[in-house]
Image (tube, rainbow, N blue to C red):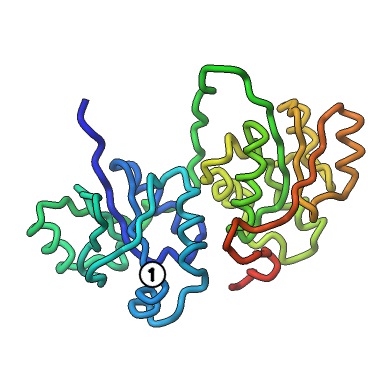
Amino acid sequence: MNAPVQVAMTGAFDDPRSRSLRFLQEAARFGELTVLLWSDETARELEGKPPKFPLAERAYFLQALRYVKQVLPASGVVNLNCLPVAPGFNPGLWVVEESRAGAPQREFCEKRGLQYRILGGGGLDGFPAFQKSPAPAGPARKRVVVTGTFDWFHSGHVRFFEEASGLGDLYVVVGHDANIRQLKGEGHPLFPQEERRYMVQSIRFVTEALISTGQGWLDAAPEIQRLKPDIYAVNEDGDKGGKREYCQQQGIEYIVLQRAPAPGLPRRSSTVLRGF
């Protein structure tokens, strides 16, 4: 069996929204994807402005994506026309976003025997559903459900999923647009439900993401009835709306997780990040 192609991408990856994730997803179709991530200094130099998110946070978010095999620091000469080096990593393909593509990059690849692909345009449209993998052999794990808006998606959400998935197979129920608007008012959500579900499902800690069909703070009740979870996990901000009482009635274990960022990362809030 032939070894998978080692695919390389490089950049700051400072805009963790659906377009960037679609780009990574499509690049990963060519083989095992490695991101050669720019430092804060390189991002400032090449983008003309400092990154919104520090290197450690950008690396944490990228490594949590199911499309990314590994994240390595870009080293050596870093510019838009050459692929940075990383000790021990030997790529066979460089994938570039259409808006950044150019003849010098193609020449760089030809001299080094690398394949070169450009992605962009309508090929990155839409939010394809992730095909859930069959459960691995072995003892059955508990089913864990979490719910929320997950509107301006950030590293704090990733950390929440990471911790909740430690309790069992994680199912995330994303609030549907009409209910979010009813609960939070006009202007909410910023992103439509299919896009929010796509962002959630892109995280490797998530077994499956669904869209709620109920109403109110317990809009996920129909999905919970179908999933029959062992655990309903919330963070401290989400411990409201009758969820605790609902779980007592349904015989579901209710766990409140502390809202804390991954070690070394800043605390994030969707409210603060709106328009960031």
Q: What residue is shown at x 72% (from left), y 49% (from top)?
A: 148
Relative horizontal placement of residue 213, taking residue 106 as reference (left or right) = right
Q: What residue is shown at x 32% (from left), y 67% (from top)?
A: 99
Viewport quadrant of the N terminus: top left
Viewport quadrant of the C terminus: bottom right
Work out whether residue 200 or residue 55 is closer to the camera in this orientation and state it. 55
In the rendering, at what x and y percent does residue 166 appear? 63, 37
Relative horizontal placement of residue 55, taking residue 227 as reference (left or right) = left
Q: What residue is shown at x 88% (from left), y 40% (from top)?
A: 244
| Number of disc labels | 1
Relative horizontal placement of residue 201, taking residue 226 as reference (left or right) = left
Q: What residue is shown at x 65% (from left), y 62% (from top)?
A: 190
Work out whether residue 266 or residue 28 is closer to the camera in this orientation and state it. 266
Relative horizontal placement of residue 192, taking residue 56 as reference (left or right) = right
Q: Is 96 placed above or below 214 here?
A: below
Query: Does dot 1 land on a helix, a strand or a loop?
Result: loop
Identify residue type, mark 1: Ser
Work out whether residue 92 or residue 129 is closer to the camera in this orientation and state it. 92
Q: Is 115 placed above or below 41 here?
A: above
Work out whether residue 226 or residue 36 is closer to the camera in this orientation and state it. 36
Q: Decide: few, some or many residues near mark 1? Use Cα within 10 Å; few <14, some 14-19, many ≥20.
A: many
Q: Which of the 4 image quadrants contains residue 223?
A: top right
Name the residue beneath numbered marker 1: 39
In the rendering, at what x and y percent does residue 67 appear? 42, 45
In the rendering, at what x and y percent does residue 274 appear? 64, 69
Q: Is 254 placed above or below 49 here?
A: above
In the rendering, at what x and y percent does residue 182 appear? 81, 56
Q: Is 97 placed above or below 8 here?
A: below
Q: Which of the 4 image quadrants contains residue 169?
A: top right
